[in-house]
Amino acid sequence: MPEIRHALTIKREDDFANWYQAVIAEAGLAEESGVRGCMVIKPWGYGIWERIQRLLDDRIKATGHENVYFPLFIPLSNFEREAEHVEGFAKEMAVVTHHRLIGDGEGGLIPDPQAKLEEPLVVRPTSETIFGDAMARWIQSWRDLPLKLNQWANVVRWEMRTRMFLRTSEFLWQEGHTAHATAEEAKDHTLTMLEVYRAHAENDLALPVIAGEKPENERFPGAVETWSIEAMMQDGKALQAGTSHYLGTNFSQASGIKYQAREGGEQFCHTTSWGVSTRMIGGVIMTHGDDDGLRVPPRIAPQQVIILPMLRDKPEDDALIAYCEELRASLAAQSALDEPVRVLLDTKPGKAAAKRWDWVRKGAPVIVEVGGRDMENGVVSMLRRDNLWNAETGKPAFETPSREALAESISDLLTGIQTALFEEARERRDAQIVEEVSSFDDVRAYYSKGRKFPGWVKVAWSKPTGATLDKVVEQLKDLKLTIRNVPMDTFAPDGPCIFTGETAKEWIYVAKAY
Amino acid sequence: MPEIRHALTIKREDDFANWYQAVIAEAGLAEESGVRGCMVIKPWGYGIWERIQRLLDDRIKATGHENVYFPLFIPLSNFEREAEHVEGFAKEMAVVTHHRLIGDGEGGLIPDPQAKLEEPLVVRPTSETIFGDAMARWIQSWRDLPLKLNQWANVVRWEMRTRMFLRTSEFLWQEGHTAHATAEEAKDHTLTMLEVYRAHAENDLALPVIAGEKPENERFPGAVETWSIEAMMQDGKALQAGTSHYLGTNFSQASGIKYQAREGGEQFCHTTSWGVSTRMIGGVIMTHGDDDGLRVPPRIAPQQVIILPMLRDKPEDDALIAYCEELRASLAAQSALDEPVRVLLDTKPGKAAAKRWDWVRKGAPVIVEVGGRDMENGVVSMLRRDNLWNAETGKPAFETPSREALAESISDLLTGIQTALFEEARERRDAQIVEEVSSFDDVRAYYSKGRKFPGWVKVAWSKPTGATLDKVVEQLKDLKLTIRNVPMDTFAPDGPCIFTGETAKEWIYVAKAY
């Protein structure tokens, strides 16, 4: 087989971490801003986020939530209320202490000592406590329940080691906050939103995920139950791609969220919270990216079809552009994956080949080139980004449908790419999950075999708590492993816990993780 | 005429400021958060903002911009670069000085003295300087121009006196930032975006506005030209509802935004910036609100039609809900104002009359009540929010079209309400603009006549600058007046400036303002 000359200089298998950074740079997704730990999300990256927002927002609204907006700043004292929450969050946060700058007398600026805040304000790392304040005001009786709110916002957690999209000091997310009359209803809702996330990840982002409960040690600070969706990256590591928390009455008691019950008497509400963030984009990159850059699943691609006329700066260009514009209009008139097809006719200055490779690196699902000869023959030269190379020739696998045939088949084509990306990721993940593990030694052996990209192991455990759990966590930590979650809907294990030797209660996934 | 019992207890003419707060509270738009100067935007208020975002975002994209996201935090030193910008903004800003909290040993939390930032970070009041940094990296040659970016974001300006939507410490907005090769192109673009704002305000929000240039003293810090759209509130005051700035090469020089010209040689880019914010919602309230609450123009109404079944907690309710659900589906299948009709079937617990008045106060454009008798007769009881009362009876002006007739006419009905709200506001504004003013004494007389809600005066002036302008500004300030803008596309005045007595160069609007 001829060697393929890929569009990136770094290959996944040679250096996954640098490959990841290269995709982000070469696909124009984001870059370092110069502000510590904060990135600039560039048009193509932000376009993907806008698509994620639109699709997830529809799902959140379809489950009866309304969007709201709460303040960026949270008074310090809010964090002093819920003990576990303080413990978990009162560490690395951005603190506003002054509200004015003045000249330092030497042409520079300093915070004005006269403008020191009486109570410092924390830039929200998450908003349970401030939503709690409002819920306490808004909820009087059972008639006000359930209260189902969501907000799209930026949050800040001062991270020491940052990585674009995966862990940045500022990130974008949605955070849902709901209040319910009973524990049962709130727990049900926690799982409803977990299912929303699963469906969104799998159907919209083509990310196969395992939905399940996090172990006690991985719970959100203040939560009674924390559930997650976990995706496997191409290097075998796990990425927690979304979490849904049942908070019991912990935050209700801290904020005074009470209601008059139907049958009389005052009760604390049971609350939930759940969020997904721009981290999802990191998951898309590490799941669908290849040695030519990113491959964006059609549902979240800002543009699904790119039309590149082979312009020559000559009078014939006008006819070619007109031909391409007709193609653009006929494609945009089609629907695919329940929405009008998104098509871009790219007439920016630049060489056609250079522009093609730009779009390959960005991962536009379908790239269509049209030259003078194509126009004469009534055809186009088309590349599917998910199937870029002709393995026999080592060249790009161009197809040349007629212009009409392309318009007629575009819906199937985009649907096919969406499905193919999901199936490819699911097969790879399933092949990298090891289930034949009957002892901790097996786990150690699996991760010690010098495997480049070891996957996950699925093991039976007795669901230890407290000090016993701490010991398990430490044992895993030595191998740089963590417990990911307890998958839903599986049979209970038949045999002993690989950690404690006691009767196993459930399965858990163990993996290296981002 | 019988007296009408309005839905609010405070009337506009009695106390406009408190009426404004009452509408915000009673329509469930927003409330004080408890965090100084920051509000909570509630579902109905945020729903209006989402509609504004969607419609304006489409217009911004249609003019060739791409959305991006830049950091919330801006290093202090960025503000030291552009002298005028510092002067204008380096005052009331939120300053982050620490990145960690620790326990104070008494159960409380304090900023960790060990975690003081070397360089304080400012929470963005606007993002010219940080976009400038990126533009300097991204632009090399004329081929990279124009660069047209936009972001939707929260910004913070520490305001001493705040009023919900109009002036809050944190607010939501979009800020566009563009770079161009020439002054002419950048100036053209400044006006293109001004026109986008005018069209958005008038067509989407039904806010009649005057588009024009701000006088020198009202320019954005660092701008060469500042243009605005100005709307008149029902109390006659002006509200600056959007601004578009031509920044010359001021920010390019400060940030080093240069390009290689086509003809060779390095040039500074000419940049623009422009923004509208949640302030717009304040404008909608003060333009379209009445003594019964808000009236939301259909294009920006989160729900355009509310269906209220008169439920009685009896078995017959099921048939009524089914009848209403059919109506909902038939309305939702219609299009109005270029989009599918947004209909809500409200089956929440509560008395039908109480719910009707809730929706009246919220300002849903069309409210449809359906009782058992309506169902039997195949009709509905409909209220148009823009024409709520029957003046003869002093009762709500219900109409009773058949269910089918309502579905057939809904498009015309919503279009009619959108137009009627705009026309009503335009007529009121035009009637409150005084043009027969030939001296400053006339201005003084107009504003001293004990008029409750004086409007604007349009006067001829000589466009003074420097100290002469300062004097004019002082003169107006004594009457609590400001210069709003110089309207576009009007004939030059024929006569002397009312301030300086010199030959007048242009018309300006003078008004009290928010």
Image: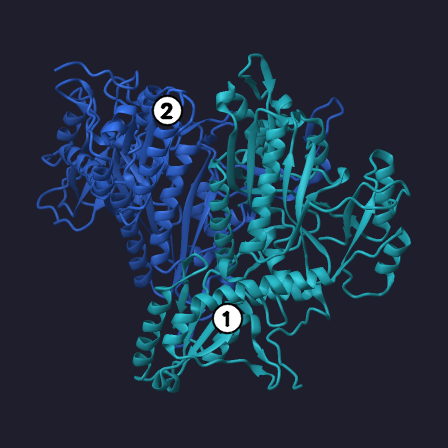
Chain colours: A cyan, B blue
Q: Which residue shows up at 17% across the image and 18% down it?
A: B394
Q: Which numbered mark, 2 or 1, is in the foreground of this view?
A: 2
Q: Is residue B356 shown left or right of residue A419?
A: left
Both labels 2 and 1 in a single chain: no
For residue A359, the mark is: 1
Secondary element at image label 1: helix
Among the 4 quarters of the image, the one containing residue B209: top left
Does A407 sit above or below residue A390?
above
Secondary element at image label 2: loop
Q: Quadrant of the N terminus of chain A?
A: bottom right
For residue B400, the mark is: none
Does B73 sit above or below residue A216?
below
Image location of residue B235, percent across then percent down? 24, 27
Q: Which residue shows up at 40% across the image and 38% down it?
A: B47
Q: Which residue shows up at 91% across the image and 54% down it?
A: A441
Q: Is residue B467 shown left or right of residue A254?
A: left
Q: Which residue is mark 2?
A: B316
Q: Amino acid at mark 2?
A: Glu
Which chain does tag 2 point to? B
Q: Amino acid at mark 1?
A: Trp
Image location of residue A455, percent across then percent down? 76, 59
Task: Tell which of A3 and B505 is nearer to you.
Answer: A3
Task: Tell which of B58 and B194 is nearer to you.
Answer: B58
Task: Tell which of B514 and B86 is nearer to you.
Answer: B514
Neighbours of disc 2 within 10 Å: few (<14), some (14-19), many (20+): few
Task: Tell which of A104 and B43 is nearer to you.
Answer: B43
Which chain does tag 1 point to? A
Neighbours of disc 1 within 10 Å: few (<14), some (14-19), many (20+): many
Per the model, the C-alpha gap separating discs 2 and 1 is 60 Å
Q: Is residue B98 shown left or right of residue A322?
A: right
In the displayed image of the protein, which residue is found farthest to the top?
A265
Image location of residue A265, percent across then percent down? 58, 12
